[in-house]
Amino acid sequence: MSEPYAFTLVETGGPEILCADHIDLPVPGPGQVLVRHEAVGLNFIDTYHRSGLYKLPLPSGLGAEAAGVVEKVGEGVSGYREGNRIGYFTGPLGSYASHRVIDSDRLVKLPEGMDSEQAAAVMLKGCTAEYLIERCAKVAPGQAVLVHAAAGGVGSILLPWLKHLGATVIAHAGDSRKAGIASELGADHALCCPMDALAGEVRALTGGRGVPVVLDGVGEASWTASLGSVARRGLIVSYGNASGPVPPFSALDLLSAGSIFVTRPTLADYCATPEEMRKSAERVFELVMNGTIEVRIGARFPLLKAADAHRAIESRSTTGSTVLLP
């Protein structure tokens, strides 16, 4: 489409429900800016919204992350002007669009040398990695950490970040090709065994102790393996549902696993204010620009082919980040 367009979710279901409509070019109100998107980030949470796993009031926009250029500034906006290169990653939903209006306090300025594709590929996933490692699990040098889906969008950022902090990384991936990617990313041990064998492998690598921290974005399929891999008084951070939500469990299950801790965090609670959001993004940009984190874009799709991108990420056939191009 050559005219402005946006995706609107009017029902939940499979990827086939995704379609775009022409829109009038929106006008920014007080405190808002008009952004022309150059790249949109695809994240697993987009599929949860589309499918109805995470309930939304409908109709709704879709997508929380994008990067582009400020085209118009509303009354009362300070700190931004036309032509600024910006990004955002905490919504509100509506990034699946060629243009949109958004509150200026949702924006971050992109550093020199970072293009829009890199920004859209790394902001949400990178800030997820930041809070998981540095504020939620508070990983310490020398700690062993199990990372599920280690070659995926978040996993491919978690691995080099953990190594940068001096952790010992045990990575698990879905096949040998992805395990090879995990090794390239710095994993000390890159596994691709079946889930029902993973806990035994982790125990063997840790002298039977298990790992103090498990970072689990897979969910249902990995839950039993995570319980079997975590050390006494260790922590499971369940931050995603790539295979479906974690099954119901009881407090006694946590006792049986060794008096362990479990948390189910979300980025919205760790970037709850503009200050938290910008500080998190600055940390990510710092590690990207100094070479600690390489932005790995595994696939690019036209935004108008968003349905194909959703099929690819849900089939777990992608590695690294996927970006959608308006």
Image: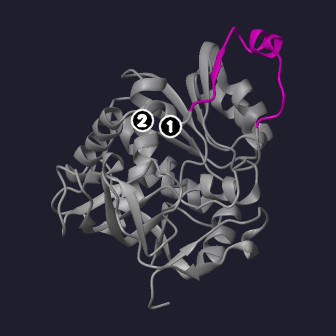
Mark 2 and mark 1 in contact (Cβ < 8 Å)? Answer: yes
Quarter of the figure with the C terminus: bottom left
Q: Describe residue 308's horizontal placement relative to residue 68 as left or right.
A: right
Determine the CA span between mark 1 and mark 2. Answer: 5 Å
The residue depicted at 28 percent of the width and 36 percent of the height is 279
* Span colored in magenta: 246-265
Q: Residue at x 78, y 31 (%)?
A: 224
Query: In the image, residue 7 lies at what x, y percent?
Result: 59, 72
Q: Quadrant of residue 227?
A: top right
Q: Nearer the viewer, residue 256 or 45?
A: 45
Q: Give above or below for 217 relative to 23.
A: above
Q: Nearer the viewer, residue 275 or 325?
A: 275
Q: Amino acid at mark 2?
A: Cys
Count of labels shown?
A: 2
110 lies above or below 287 = below
- Disc number placed over residue 268 in the picture, else none: 1
Depth check, front residue: 45 or 139? 45
Badge 2, how many Cα within 10 Å: few under 14, some, many 20+? Answer: many
Q: Say whether residue 254 is magenta.
A: yes
Residue 208 visible in the shown view: no
* Nearer to me, 210 or 28: 28
Q: Secondary structure at mark 2?
A: loop
How packed mark 1 is, by other alpha carbons closer than 10 Å (few <14, some 14-19, many 20 or more), is: few
| Residue 149, x across and y down, in percent | 60, 48
Name the residue beneath numbered marker 2.
Answer: 271
Image height check: is 261 above or below 240?
A: above
For badge 1, the amino acid type reads Ala
Relative to 76, residue 306 above or below: below
User: What numbered label is drawn on residue 258?
Assistant: none
Magenta stretch containing residue 78, yes or no? no
Q: Is residue 223 visible?
A: yes
